[in-house]
Amino acid sequence: MRPVRSSVLCRLLPAPFSLALRSLVLVLLCITPRCQAVQAENVTVLEGGTAQISCRLQNYDGSIVVIQNPRRQTLFFNGTRALKDERFQMVLFTPQLVRITLTNVSVSDEGGYFCQLYTDSTHHQVATLSVSVPPETPTVEVKQDVAEGSEAELTCVSPRSKPAATLRWTRNGREIPGVVSQQDNGKTFSVSSTIRIPVERKDNGAALMCEALHPALSGQRRIRHYRLDVYFAPTVRIVPPTGILREGDSLSLTCSVTGNPLPRDIGWSKVNDTLPERAEISGPTLQISRLSQAHNGTYLCQAQNDFGRAADHYALLVYGEYAKKKKTTLFS
Ligand SMILES: *[C@@H]1O[C@H](CO)[C@@H](O)[C@H](O)[C@H]1NC(C)=O
Ligand SMILES: *[C@@H]1O[C@H](CO)[C@@H](O)[C@H](O)[C@H]1NC(C)=O
Ligand SMILES: *[C@@H]1O[C@H](CO)[C@@H](O)[C@H](O)[C@H]1NC(C)=O
Ligand SMILES: *[C@@H]1O[C@H](CO)[C@@H](O)[C@H](O)[C@H]1NC(C)=O
Ligand SMILES: *[C@@H]1O[C@H](CO)[C@@H](O)[C@H](O)[C@H]1NC(C)=O
């Protein structure tokens, strides 16, 4: 920087939590008849963070230094607090540098801060404070229950950010384009992205992701994971026993059921008959111990949910007891 005779160099310095600096404001400063160009930097601070506002003095002659907020209210009058806002603190006042800090920065603190040096005439320099608001993890809203064969409508919502966040839907790493809508809530934005995808039962449990992208996140990720819940009618299958069944054997039939929601009650019955007395049902399993030929018949397993019903049947044939038969043939 070139030497400056008598000037106020005012700039915002980044606080530890502030974002990267953006180089900025060139203001012409005329304290003496010689006008000097001085440089300041615009700064962007995260909401809730701390900003440092520094006024660099050169050839300071003991004049009154005034620091004003964007509404031109005087914050400090030559080192003495003027505005009752404890978030502003004077941290340094030397012939070279006047520095104040602003803690818990909010979007309403944005604007130009004035450093003024009262001399023969009044001169000031402005540094612009920008506040950025990174988005929280977005939420996912589902319009209604999604049944197989229909379309799922999912909306990813980022209610507050500055500048507006970008929402990105993906499935297995592939982007799904959404219909984006953006609302300006004064200083901050709410953004939503809606996708419509046709779903089948194989899509039940499929993993989707909605990510909010924002320059202030600097490496952090804001991802909402969402699993598709696709409703579908049940399927039912009886797993048959292997080999033939003879009198005295025991029968165990298991009914394998799918469906979303999974049917709670599995119904066992015998076609055109009542279930044998010895039949025992526990969950999806029907058991009959010591089979006899009277157990011959068709057994039915049924299940249902709100989206449909399904059934499977098993025809039981009980053969005569082999060993007994053999004995009978041999010894009678
Ligand atoms: C600094 O911020 C002000 C206000 O937003 C803008 O007009 C100016 O161009 C910025 N300067 C630089 C160098 O970015
Ligand atoms: C303003 O404050 C500075 C630093 O404390 C001091 O040196 C200077 O004399 C003050 N100026 C006036 C006019 O009070
Ligand atoms: C920071 O400011 C917000 C309002 O802008 C307030 O709700 C919050 O309590 C403040 N936090 C602290 C630590 O002062
Ligand atoms: C059940 O009874 C009906 C009418 O008597 C008959 O048509 C059907 O074949 C029977 N089903 C079985 C599995 O026995
Ligand atoms: C049961 O089925 C077996 C095998 O088909 C047959 O031999 C037997 O006569 C049947 N018994 C009855 C009571 O239907």
Image (cartoon, grey):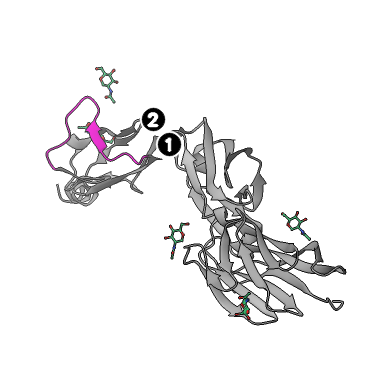
Q: The residue tagged with tag 2: helix, strand or loop?
A: loop
Position of residue 62 measured from the top left corner of the image (x, y, whole percent): 68, 78
Where, by quadrant of the figure, is residue 180 drawn? top right
**Front residue of 77 and 217:** 77
In the rendered structure, does residue 217 fall within the stretch colored magenta?
A: no
Label 1 belongs to which residue? Answer: 231
Distance (Cα) linking label 2 and label 1:
7 Å
Mark 2 near mark 1, Cβ–Cβ under 8 Å? yes
Confirm whether residue 147 shows in the render. Answer: yes
Side of 281 where 120 appears, left or right = right
Which residue in the rendered view is the most extreme toward the left?
277
Q: Amino acid at mark 2?
A: Phe
Q: Which residues are magenta?
A: 261-278
Q: Residues within 10 Å of mark 1 (few under 14, many from 20)?
A: many
**Principal secondary structure, stretch drawn in magenta:** loop
| Residue carrying label 2 | 307
